[in-house]
Structure formats: structure tokens, C-alpha cells
Amino acid sequence: MRLPDLIAQTFEEKFQSKPIIVRSPGRINLIGEHTDYNEGFVLPAAIDKSIYLGFARNNTGTCRVYSLDFEEEQSFSLDNLKPAKGWVNFVMGVANAIQKSGKKLEGFDCVFGGDIPIGAGLSSSAALENGVGFGLNQLFDLQLERLELLKFSQQAEHEFVGVKCGIMDMFASMMGKKDQVIRLDCRSLAHSYFPLELGDYQLILCNTKVAHSLAESAYNQRREECQEGVNLVKQQFPEVNSLRDISLPMLDKAKGEMSAVVYKRCAYVIQENERLIKTCVALDKQDLKAVGQFLYGSHDGLSLDYEVSCPELDFLVDYTRELPYVLGARMMGGGFGGCTLNLIKKTDKNEFIAAISAAYAHKFNRQMDSYEVNVADGTGLINL
Ligand code: GAF
């Protein structure tokens, strides 16, 4: 049975009413990692792996939410919402953000489940938050724009989940368009779409299947380190507001004031923004070899300077470096586990997956997963 049908069927069994069904996708990011919260650029896209959610009003003050994947039901009242434990925070966080904006919610039932691998760095949490916002907007006719909804998703992440994430994941999931990559300026939220034309090449994700526990604390710490760098550069260049405004020569002028760690974090972000701009030029010229080199450059920066990689991710990227049919690879997302993104020749896909899976299993005594991803539309209603 297709996932949306399964959601509808489960909903009717549990709650005895017919739901509306929302699809909300995960995302990939071609390049531009840890640049979003530094007001830089990112190059993500929504993918064909999604969470599906069914919603109906229940005419009470209580919300009942069932997770198909966790086989667990949670309920909460809309009065005085507070962070709790586990996945229900993603739902409550969005409901809370909507209510704080002055919009009125009433009791609802929800069933959700999906095929975005959890903890793989494909933004299943942003997909869920966007799906909740989108569904409640429809259900209660709140007249909220997509841009408002995705900001509520980010607010939920900050206030209920405790991760001070940037805007990239929710933006890509909500605003994605089939076969198009989004070039997003995370300062102004100005964005443009362009087709991802990879010719004989395609993107394959390799999932390390590890999620090191450092991820959340290190993420917030990186944000603080970047801010510390900005504050120090600002003493000499008062016009500076974020790393986006800082060039390497400017950073170098303040180098004596900052720790070596803060310096390399900031240098990475500045270089990653430059790499992204060059990647757009290379994509425009269909120069995929150059794109591949920028992917490796991004990985090296993330691993050595930003220090958000891990042995499993490094191994998967290093393994590809000598393979003639791989143009580039890098870790993707927040880091400390999850997936690598690989630009590989279509004809060598099977050989690639077999070889890298065997090498990974041999090295870590653990199986990796691999996925072909296609670029898909963002969050929306679907008809069964
Ligand atoms: C995570 C965050 F949620 C994003 O905002 C972004 O910072 C990313 O890590 C790193 O680029 O996915």
C-alpha cells in the first residue's frame, strides 16, 4: 500500500473520520553547509522522500497525534504548551508558534509517517514541522503564507526542540520545486530556482547510519564561535553584522584578537560561501568536474576547520577520491553522522554502491545504506 493511503486508512481506523493528506519532503543540500545561520547562501532542494500527514478537526480542546513509525500516540491540550520529550515537540512547537502569532487553533487529530530515514541528515524534522504547519493552515483556514509557515517551523525547532538551526531545511522542504535547486540568500530570503542538469551524472546519498550524540551541543557551539568571530571583527569594522559581511583579509586583520579555533570556524564559513558562488557559475557552464572539486573542498573545510565530520563520513568521502567515475563527494547537513552526497557517473552506480558498501562494512563492521534522490516539489496537499 502507498504511504499516503496507509496514513488515510490508519487515520480512519483510529479516529473514525476522513483526513486531509499533506506530503512534506526532506531535503538535500548541494553545497553551502553551516552558512545559513551566518546569513550566507545555501543550495538545497526538496527530495522525493517525504512525511505524509493526515489531519481532521475533532471539535475538542485536545490534540491527538499518532506516529506510524514510532507506533505511539501522544495527546496534548492547546492551552499553555510547554516542551515535552520526543517527537511530539515537533508538533506542539509548531502549534505553539502559530498560536503565539495570534492565530486560533482548535483540537485536531493527526496521523503521520514517512520514508525519510530518521537521523540521516535529510531533515525529517523540518519536513514534519512544515507538514504540521501546512496541515493546520488548511484545516483551520488560517490564511498563512508559506514563508510564515516555514518560519514557524524554525521557531518550533528553537523553542521546543532546542536546536538553534538556520532556515535552510524548512525553506527547502516548504519551497522546493520539482527538478529545481534553490539558491537561497539566508539573509534576505531572496531566492531563485534553477534546473539541476547533471547529464551523465547523478546524486547518490550514502548513509553512515550513525548519529553521534555530539551533534546538538556542537551545533549550538559552532553558532556561538561564529558569533564570537563576528564580534571581534566588528571592533575594527563596525559595519559588519554577520560572517556574510566579512572577507578573509578582514578576518585576518582581527586574527590576533581571536583563538585559533574561532579563526578557523570563521574562515571555513567565508570560504564556503565563496565556493557556493563558484559552484553556481560552474553549474551554469555545465562544468561538473569543477562542481565535484568544490564538493570535496566543502568536505575538507567541514572536516578540518569546522570540525563537524566524523570518521565514518570521512571514510566514505575519502573512499571516492580515487574512483574515476566519482566527480565529488562531501558530508551533508549538520554533521557528526548522516549522509554523504556523491556526484557519480550513472553507468557506474551499481559498481560504486557495491564497492563502497563492502569497504564500509569491512572498516566499521556496520552496513551503510544508499539512496538515489530525485528533486521534488515542496510541502503540499495531495489528493488520494
Ligand atoms: C542542520 C540545520 F538544521 C541547518 O539549518 C543547517 O545549518 C545545516 O545543519 C548545516 O548546513 O541541518
Image: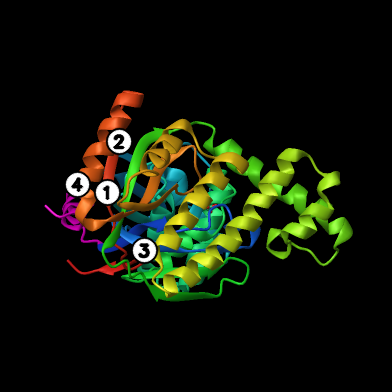
Res. 371 mark:
1
Q: Secondary structure at mark 1?
A: strand
The residue that mark 4 highlights is 350
Q: Is residue 369 above or below residue 63?
A: above
Pointer 1 local density, CA inside 10 Å: few below 14, some 14–19, many at least 20 = some
Answer with mark 4 or mark 1, whichever residue precedes in sequence. Answer: 4
Disc 1 residue type?
Tyr
User: Which residues, given as a range, are shown in magenta?
Assistant: 1-19
Disc 3 residue type?
Gly
Q: Is residue 142 above or below residue 263?
A: below
Answer with mark 1 or mark 3, whichever residue precedes in sequence. Answer: 3
Distance in Å between CA atoms under marks 4 and 2? 14 Å
Q: Is residue 209 above or below residue 288?
A: above
Q: Nearer the viewer, mark 4 or mark 1?
A: 4
Pointer 4 local density, CA inside 10 Å: few below 14, some 14–19, many at least 20 = few
Distance in Å between CA atoms under marks 2 and 3? 34 Å
Distance in Å between CA atoms under marks 4 and 1? 12 Å
